[in-house]
Amino acid sequence: MSSYDLSSILIVLLPIVSFVTLSVFGKRIKPSISGVLGTMSLAITLVLALYVAYGYFFDFGMQAGAHVKHIALQFQWLKFNENLSIDLGIVLDPISVMMLVVITAVSTMVHLYSINYMHGEERFTMYYAYLSLFTFSMLGLVVAVNIFQMYIFWELVGVSSFLLIGYYYTKPSAIAAAKKAFIVTRFADLGFLIGILMLSYGAKTLDFFTLIERLTQPNSVYLASFAGSSFLGLSALSWALLLVFTGGAGKSAMFPLHIWLPDAMEGPTPVSALIHAATMVVAGVFLVGRLFPIFAISAPDALHIVGYIGGFTALFAAIIACTQTDIKRVLAYSTISQIAFMMFALGVSGWGEESEGFTASMFHLFTHAFFKALLFLGAGAVIHAVHSNEMEDMGGLRKALPITHITFLLACLAIAGVPPFAGFFSKEAILSAAFHGNSLIFYVGLFTSCLTAFYMFRLYFRIFWYNPVKEDHHNHEGHTWPMNIALIILAFGAVFAGLIPFGHFVSADGKPIELPFHLTFSIAPVLLGIAGILLAYVMYGEKNEMPDKLTASISGLYRAAYRKFYIDEVYLFVTKKVLFNLVGRPAAWFDRNVVDGMINGYASITTMSSESIKPMQSGRLQSYTMFFLGGVLLVAALLVIKFM
Amino acid sequence: MDTLSLLILIPLVTALGVLVSKKDQTIKLVALAGSILQLGFSVWLTLFYVGLRNAGISGMFLMQNSIEWFAPLHIYFRSGVDGISLSMILLTAFVVVGGILVSWRIEKQVKEFFFLLIFLSLGAYGFFISTDLFMMFFFLEIAVIPKYLLIGIWGSGKKDYSAMKLALMLMGGSALVFLGIVGMYYAAGVYGSAPTWDLQALSQIKLPIEIQRVLYILIFTGFGIFTAMFPFHTWAPDGHSSAPTAASMFLAGISMKLGGYGCLRVATYLLPDAAQELSWIFIILASIAIIYGAFATMMQKDLKYMNAYSSVSHCGFVILGIAMLTKTAITGAVIQMVSHGVMTALFFATIGMIYDRAHTRQADELGGVLKQIPFIGTTFIIVGLCSLGLPGFSGFVSEMTVFVGSWEHPGVWYKVATILACASIVVTAVYILRAVGLAIWGTIKNKEFEQLKDARWNERLATVLLVVGILIIGLCPFWITKLVDSDSLIIFNKLISVASLAH
């Protein structure tokens, strides 16, 4: 076992060790120590992840001109039958190694940041325990060698997210949000599970790489087993993949399963940065990326559907983001929109020569993790200072929060796609892939990136410029250095992550590619982005009447977008009215009154019949004589009839 | 005297020890010591069994023994164990220790209470080691009667009604089972060499399909009633809600498993032709139980009712797995029995702990108890997560094995049934999280709850024991699969040999 393998095993194990230690011995550890302990263990995993990434990309990963997968560990965990078993293990390949770096980096920053942010919380140690549990689950998810291993860790990230959203468990809104997040994603996971069952039944394996091999080779018998049946014009394989994608859409908050993510902002802000911006919510993109060869080679129709869902969600969420007033909710909708960018980039991608969409998607996943985590942590610093999530309590904070202001601005420039910040490169790659893949999605993406610039700078100007609520030149950042360090490090990522020649490292088939870059092509997106920023400045640079006039002139659309297009209400109707009242209540009533009523009915019939025949055994000789006589007469009558 | 008889002897001696003890404290200590000894012995027995298997000893049952009991009717006390019965024995041993620990503070008629608990467990152990149908039935009855008394005397609420309902319905179930096995006994005389109750001898006799059909329906339904199979499940909610904590734990943890074991070992294994032909009936009933039980659970406010209905839903997986007739599904059903047994025992224990303190089980009257009693609250969340099938706990392993096994069945309608069963995991999540949100999280609604004290040593010990049980299966499923798999293969091979002959 090489030192790289050992490091990769340690990367996964350290967080779970930290979870067990903190949760079992939590009461005996001082809060200040538990924070440092958690952060230190994560920092070690970050170093190890960088070491593994270096090793993989520059030492042992490249063979015959392509990055190949490397199994660092694999063992059988649960055997179902001769073909199917759940294996647990660690695979190193371009996307898993990239994810290891992203997860450990963001998680370390969030751990560090939380030392300040969560200071003085009653369950501080438990908070760190949950963070470690989440990090472990997410790492286990990305290194999965087996589709069921991924499902296992998929559920585990779900539950860690549930526990962290419900961290303030005495708050009704936090309880509701935690439940909603878990149940919506669980519903989506049902699709994932059935998809796994379908794939494994046809391909006779649960191993990711055997699965991909068996379902991508033309003329394979396994592929043929799917070909027989089709439903609504899609083959069984497409359905299986779409069901798997449903799971991904749930975690990645694609329309119409996005409703849990904005509510999930009830959790502590660093949690939102880690789970609901940088890592867990991109699990769906990662899942499609993992199965990408099957999608692209054997079921392009399913991939197109992924693309359209992504395109629609990107636009839909961006429109809502323009109207929200809670700064975390703006960021939440922005996250949905950006993940949808990654999703449609996969959707427009092809295989082989045309697979730049895949690389672009992973690239955006990588850069987005940094600037979106930074945005959330910056928002956290703002909330920490003004004790409110609402825009109307903010304004003119650039003097009170100088470091937050600068880093937030850098992140906004990155997400708006202004060169040379990180988001510019990845977004250009996505738009260019869409341009070659699907022109409808391309125009949607172009328009959405203009909206992105607008709503992000609306947020920026509204927080840091605008008219201050109260004059406050006091610096709030003096004694919060762990928070500031985390912000500054992430800002480096937001500025420079785009300069990495990403195509050299990550591509669909492992062979390095050059992401195309044409100056002429990028003019339009950049200009549109700058137009969005200018519009935001005009409207929100300082207090004026324009926003109100504008919203009044499109009041119908504005109100609909502000109310998030009433999707929540639809869900509430279906779950509360239909499922509870039309299924649950009748089932419970039916059980108590009909099924149980039958049983009680039997009992009362028995009682009644015994009551009615009880008088016969009265013990009185006269009545017994009467019965006897009656019997004799009956027999006599029968004999007479018989022999007449 | 052979090794297996110790499994009956230890509870018997413990029960006698409880009877002769004078002080309440002594009674409890004797009961606890006996049950811990039994747990240790069961673990040793399992390791011994695995050792024998690894040494290459084959045969369906090991450590067999046969003692003549009543020769004119060919009744022998035949015993023997395989991996399936051993996992049931381990489950019983775990639940018994847990049940005795949580009953530590019982004050009313202590001697009778612990005597009945031990006696009930004796019935279960005897049932699981018997390989003679008559003895199985004998022990099945032993396990029923104490429940009536446990609920009737130590119960709460409408306990008389519940105790009577439970006893009558389970008696009805055993009547069906009895009819079935008597039929089998005589049929063996007609179609085999001589009438016999011997399970292994019966498995060699091929009965005509007409007879098999009748017997299969009788026996499967009879045992199904014990497993709370729809529509004969209504004893479960009432029985559980009225029963004292330990009795609920035994009822759901052990006696519901007697039914599943019987459905597998007697109905399916001995009547394979009928199983191939008619198991679809029970697949339908199981699918209904799973979904309908889950929806009915969603509407319950009383935590005990909630867990009782969720048991109906979860035991549906057992029936589903058995009726799917594939090796993986059968293994899954066995693991589900063990998993559900430990988990639901812990669930009832936790609910009991909450009820003892707060004097209410209504989810909406509780609320915020996590802050006041963190140990119990956390246990509730852990066992809830196990119930909703979270990986790392036993529920995930067993449910997934049942799902994958059921999906192996090539028929389209069987897949529809599997999808329905899978869908229940969403509804399960709804009711578990609802209960957690209402009862455990939130702010303290009742000022009196601020005085609640957290778990005592006996409750902590019981909790840790059962949580360890859940975690062992959840984290190291390879042990239990290895134990069970070869025996489900034997049952499966018998089923497919029949199917291949038919075609």
Image (cartoon, coloured by chain):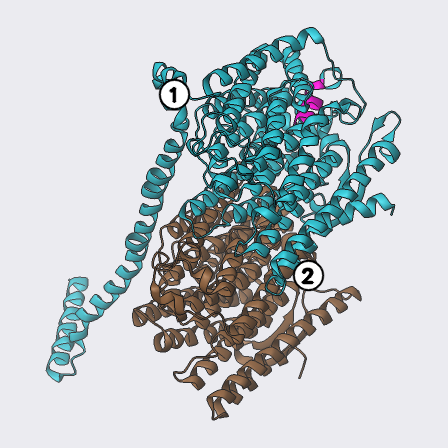
Chain colours: A cyan, B brown
Q: What chain is tagged by disc 2? A: B
Which quadrant holds residue B53? bottom right
Q: Nearer the viewer, residue A639 or B488?
A: B488
Indicate the quadrant where residue A107 lies: top right
**SS for tag 2?**
helix
Residue assigned mark 2: B483
Q: Are marks 1 and 2 in contact (CB under 8 Å)?
A: no
Q: Position of residue A637 (x, y in %)?
A: 14, 67
* The label number, if any, that marks residue A242 in the structure image: none
Local crowd size for mark 1, using a 10 Å CA cut-off: few (<14), some (14–19), many (≥20) = some
Q: Is residue A359 magenta?
A: yes
Q: Residue at 72% across / 50% down in the picture?
A: A40
**The residue marked by circle 1 belongs to what chain?**
A
Q: Residue furthest top?
A: A520
- Across and down, in percent, residue A414 comes to 63, 24
**Crowding near the residue tagged with mark 2, few <14, some 14–19, many ≥20 C-alpha atoms within 10 Å:** many
Which region is colored magenta?
A355-364
Whether discs 1 and 2 lie on one chain: the answer is no
Badge 1 amino acid: Tyr
The answer, for residue B195, to whether it is visible in the render is: no
Residue at (84%, 33%) from the top-left corner? A61
Residue A275 vs A358, above or below: the answer is below
Mark 2: amino acid: Leu
Q: Position of residue A108 (x, y in %)?
A: 68, 43
Which of A6 and A494 lies nearest the eye of the viewer?
A494
Residue A112 among magenta residues = no
Question: Which dot marks residue A558?
Answer: 1
Q: CA distance from mark 1 to mark 2?
A: 63 Å
* Percent of width and height locating residue A562: 40, 26
Which residue: 57% across, 33% down?
Answer: A252
